[in-house]
Amino acid sequence: MPDKIRKTDDEWRAQLDDLTYKVTRRHGTERAFTHDNFPKEPGTFLCICCGAPLFDQATKFDSGTGWPSFYAPLDESVIGLSEDRKFFMRRTEVHCARCEAHLGHVFPDGPAPTGLRYCLNGVALRFEPQEG
């Protein structure tokens, strides 16, 4: 993973639209079923804030939750995890290891082979189709 990216709040605000800023920099959540479904073709999902490659299309699955879901990141080093105790719940937050953008949460109710469900905000991701 390349060096960490640090920007001021004003720099993030200038780079991101209001919803993306709220989700990625202020730990918000987009409403379920409001983000366009991503293409089904081979490719990689990147962090919308810094462009770090995070998830492969091959690990995406339909969880029925209304948010993009994956069972594994490209590599454990590309994401960070932290405890989230907001809203009287105890969850595990997922963020980009490079720029610390809030991506969503991970739950232990996903499919094989990991049993994990990385439930992410669509506005926190950008899809890059596989070349060739």
Image (cartoon, rainbow, N blue to C red):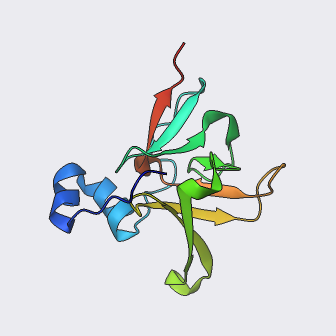
In the displayed image of the protein, which residue is found farthest to the right? 112
Q: Position of residue 56 (x, y in %)?
A: 61, 38
Count the labels in the image.
Answer: 0
Between 7 and 70, the one nearer to me in the picture = 7
In the displayed image of the protein, which residue is found farthest to the top? 132
Between 26 and 98, the one nearer to me in the picture = 98
Image quarter where the C terminus lies is: top right
* One can see residue 74 in this view: yes
Residue at 84 percent of width and 49 percent of height: 113
Q: Position of residue 14 (x, y in %)?
A: 16, 53
Residue at 51 percent of width and 48 percent of height: 33
Q: Is residue 12 left or right of residue 120?
A: left
Residue at 64 percent of width and 63 percent of height: 106
* One can see residue 61 in this view: no
Q: Position of residue 129 (x, y in %)?
A: 50, 25
Residue at 46 percent of width and 42 percent of height: 46
Between 61 and 126, the one nearer to me in the picture = 126
Q: Is residue 129 left or right of residue 110?
A: left
Depicted 131 relative to depicted 80: above or below = above
Depicted 89 relative to depicted 40: above or below = below
Depicted 18 relative to depicted 59: above or below = below
Quadrant of the rendered structure where residue 118 is? bottom right
Between 38 and 1, the one nearer to me in the picture = 1
Q: Position of residue 115 (x, y in %)?
A: 80, 57
Quadrant of the rendered structure where residue 79 is? bottom right
